[in-house]
Image (cartoon, helix red, strand yellow):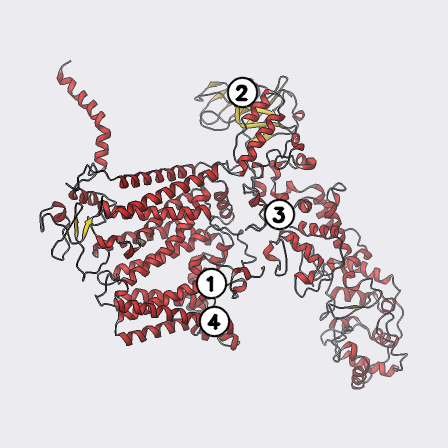
Amino acid sequence: MSGDPSRPFKWVTVVCSVVTVGFLVAAAVRENVSADWRGHQAVFRGILQIKAKDDAARATARNLPIEIRQVVVPALHTVDRCVTCHLGIDDPRMTDQPNPHRVHPKQLLAIHRVEKFGCTVCHQGQGAALNFEEAKAEDYFWDYPLLPAKFTEATCASCHDPRALPKGSVEKLVLGMQLFEQKGCNGCHKLNGKGGQLGPALDNEGLKTKHQFVRASLKGSQTNWNWFAEHFRDPAGIVAGSLMPMPALSQPQVEALTVFMLSLRQRDLPAEYLAPDKIDEQYARLHPPAPDGAALYHRYCAACHDTGLHTRWDKKFARFVPGVRNAAFIRTEDDECLAENIREGRPGTRMPGWGPKAGGLSDAEVTALVAYLRTSAPAMALPVAPPRGEATRGAALFAQECAGCHGIDGKGLIAPALANPVFQQAATDAFISQTIRAGRENTPMPAFGRAGVSESQIGDLLAYIRKWQPQARSQRP
Amino acid sequence: MPDSPKRRDFLGLTALWSVAIAMGTALAGVMRLPKPAVQPGPLRVFKLGDPAQFAVGSTTRIETGGFFLFREEQGFHAISSVCTHLGCVVAHTEGEGFACPCHGSRFSTDGSVVGGPAPAALPWLEIVLSPDGQLQVNAESAVPKGTRFKV
Amino acid sequence: MTPDTKTPIREFLENLKQSPRHIRESAMRNGKAPETDRERSQSTFHNLFLHMQSVRTDRRSLRFAYTFGLGLILTASFVVLTITGILLMVYYKPGVELAYNSVKDIHFVVPAGRFIRNIHRWSAHLMVLAVFLHMARVFYTGSYKRPREFNWLIGLALLVFTLGLSFTGYLLPWDQLAYWAVTIGANIASSPREVTDAIGITAWFDPGGFQKQLLLGANYVGQESLIRFYVLHVAVLPLLISAFMGLHFWRVRKDGGLSRDESKPAPPARIGDRDVEVFAPTKTYGLMAVVRGRTPVVGRAPEGSVTSWPNLMWAELAAFMFTIAVTLVLSYFFDAPLKEMANPAIPENPAKAPWYFLGLQELVSYSAFMGGVGIPSIVLIGLGLIPYLDRDPRGVGVWFGGPAGRRTFWQSLIYGLTSVLALLAVTVNLGWLRTWFPTIPQIAIIILNPATVIVAMYSAWSLWVLRRTGSIRMSAVALFTCFLAGFVVLTAMGSIFRGPNWHFYWWPSQWPTH
């Protein structure tokens, strides 16, 4: 039909229709024939047939429907389709099969029924997915990718007190918890409301998404666990400017701490999911046993003060951290003064307050800490302070003798600040004058009394130093 | 006549048929969508734990499953508690059988209809021992009346 | 039995036997495939779906290089979107706790769900692209001129509805893209506060706050907002766009069909399949006059036309199948995006809208009010005024209105591209007012920012063209072309060259991990 004006349109129609049919059929095949899970189920059917012992079992195996399977757990808001491929997950006969047909190891499903728990509550990953890549969901738009097997025990802590579980079942997690306490992480990080404030609180570290981490310098896998591992190796290399000190850790220790970080997740789980030991653990947190001062010191203080026996030069803080268990210091401080310093901290320095409203330590715990510090030396009866002298003379002397370390205006340089409200509040005249007179053993603070500074000069200094005392608060006698 | 009506326009016919096939294929795909590929609710297969925990002569009502589990000398059997008339849940009286509160259907102890509008007996459900040793009732699968599961 | 008693039964049986044929004939008013021009005409105006079309179509309207079939592609993609949209509604659950998982289910387990969602997404992209191109085609061929001015306005409304449908559509999965797009969109709606704050009247007059409340239904982004956007997406906007599409088509028909160059002699008419030279008065023919075949010119058709059945139908079918084929191919290879579940704690970085809003996103990165409200309003008002300012009836149906227009187009394109690129270069390398004068008041930035500067530069160029050529049409071509260039460059800027923290990068592979 030459000259038919519709001819090109007819051709376009034919070509486009053929393309349409082609892609429709291709899409149908992709979805209904060539999906991976269909293959896995067909293989599993074969395995079942081989393992069948009687005709009935063989018939059941033969008729095993090839279909999507899922575990719906309304209480946990999960729909997990992992069982579409892992058909033998609760079948003890499948111990000798390769994945995905293998039975769950360690017979854990006997006490954690699949129907009650699903899969992702322990393993994370995208339960809705029907192929392994998307279920694993690393480098995918999914917040909680599949936990590698070596980290899976992290999620046990959601329902269990790890220390109450059978020995060896959550080894890494328990080691991680111990390391966390021993290495003084709490000195800077709050956990369950207790801890310092230099670093972020860690209560929900395991529920953070990868976007909540600074990953600008993170090489390789962008998963949270890789972030933790790299960060534990070199904190400042991952988070620029991080002050976090990091003792050298072995690979198992890094892994253990990573597991512990991943276990920190405050999820609201229905009561029926909480193991009795978990409830005990929560109860124990609310009703702590008598505090142990030494343990508290290690947990909250040692990260900065180390053993506390010597003043320590901190490179990152660029100043001396006082040796708080130094006998010379402890001797001159009374218990109330120590407790006040612990409760209020030192504003303007890295030393945070540890009272109930700040660091979360109870009064009993502060008392226990003071008692622990007191083991270094008993409080001595301080010589009476000389009367306060002339502040202007004191100022000149301060500039000459003290300002080099304590700062020209007492704001502190490498040595503690004296123009500090908590110091001014806690320290008595007798304490200050005794420290000037006798110095502080094992610290750079010299004994000025032996270097020729007279009692009246000490009085002048005292007058000058007391000018920084806040007006509103009265001095302790 | 050049524009004879008898003249066949093969290209046009091909185009029309190809469109029809394309639309038919698309429609076939679309028709599959409303039927879910997987039931959205929890599984209708119920693991009831160790068979030994059920005493001989006991009747257990599994509310979430919609069936009664009977343990007798001869073995276990499970009877659906969903009325075959219009789907209400029947009540069970020991020794008498089942009664439906909605339209008055009554069933004997083995589920046979003895009164009311119900068109069929209450089905007996399949019971197996799961691979991990639990009593497992499949509420989606009926078995002939009298099929008992022996431990 | 007597014949009397037998007849009614025989008649009944006969009717029963014939009923399939009768049902078929009664359904199709013509009853059979048309064979003559008259029947072809009848098949058009005897059919509800076809009668909006003229019974004869100008051959020039069927020229691909004139329309590129864009209007048909738009209609086809709208049909595809409606069908796939309804299908998606079967499984989609509009709740903040449910939406994301229901979309995941559509993706993973709903039979054909993944494919249908992909088709929905891709035909939406196609529709937005086609609506821009369609507008450009109508503009450059002068098709907005009398008597088609009002249809141009209807078209503008359709553009706005299309963008509205796209925006409300990608919010529904309630993923990260959705959540932050709602947040940003709502704050753009409240951005008139920048102005009312600057002049200090927000306490009494707060259109921004009102708009935000209206959109979100709450003072935060949550369930109330999602359900509003859902209602907009599946009910309000589709109804509006359907009504306006009907109006648009009806006006196309009533305003004389597709525009064409009336000053040129018409190509030969086609009667049957012969080309016939006709000399007929240049008036619209009464429908019946043609199909009855009597007056005014027996045996002759209006100049240069062919019967719409089947010629126009073929064009329409081709465009429809083309649209479907393109979306299917795209849907097969590329999945519609779905980000992480909405997380109010942390936005994506960069949080990028779909491509068609990235030009705007670039603009709002200068000033939320100017980029999000001010300049879009100016552009829409300017576009709407075009047919009322350019009332020169010449140049209809000719690309760019002739060689002079073509020249203006190329000059304006070069000017438009250079100026916007230069301005972007300045902004990227040197910053803007706030970099230089950190304390500068917000009102100064609202008034003077790269977005307003580029509008001013384009307007100046257009005025200069007006003075030089003395033609409002040329000036309109200049302005439209400049804005087109600006739109393309800004869209590319937002899509490709902006990375984390909206910093400039030459290529996404240079983005730092974020």
Specify whether residue A287 is in view: no
Chain under numbered label 2: B
Q: Are marks 4 and 3 on the same chain?
A: no
Residue found at x 53% / y 20%: B97
Q: Nearer the viewer, mark 1 or mark 3?
A: 1
- Mark 2 or 3: in front is 3
Callout 4: chain: C
When asked about the image quadrant of residue A168, the answer is top right
Residue under numbered circle 4: C425
Q: Secondary structure at mark 2?
A: strand
The residue pinned by badge 1 equals C494
Secondary structure at numbered mark 4:
helix
- CA gap between label 4 and label 3 equals 51 Å
Q: Is residue A142 above or below residue C407?
A: above
Q: Which mark is residue A268?
A: 3
Dot 3 falls on a residue whose secondary structure is loop
Looking at the picture, how far across and down is residue C418, in whole percent?
A: 41, 71
Q: Residue at x 32, y 61 (%)?
A: C136
Number of the label disc, if any, that sits on residue C26: none
User: What separation in Å lies between label 2 and label 3 (alpha carbons)?
Assistant: 44 Å
The lab-note entry on whether marks 2 and 4 share a chain reads: no
Residue holding disc 2:
B97
Structural crowding at the residue carrying mark 2, measured as other residues with C-alpha within 10 Å and reported as few (<14), some (14–19) or many (≥20): some
Q: Indicate the amino acid at tag 1.
A: Gly
Asked whether residue A100 appears in the rendered view, the answer is yes
Q: As drawn, is B86 to the left or to the right of A97? A: left
> x, y percentage for residue C402?
25, 66
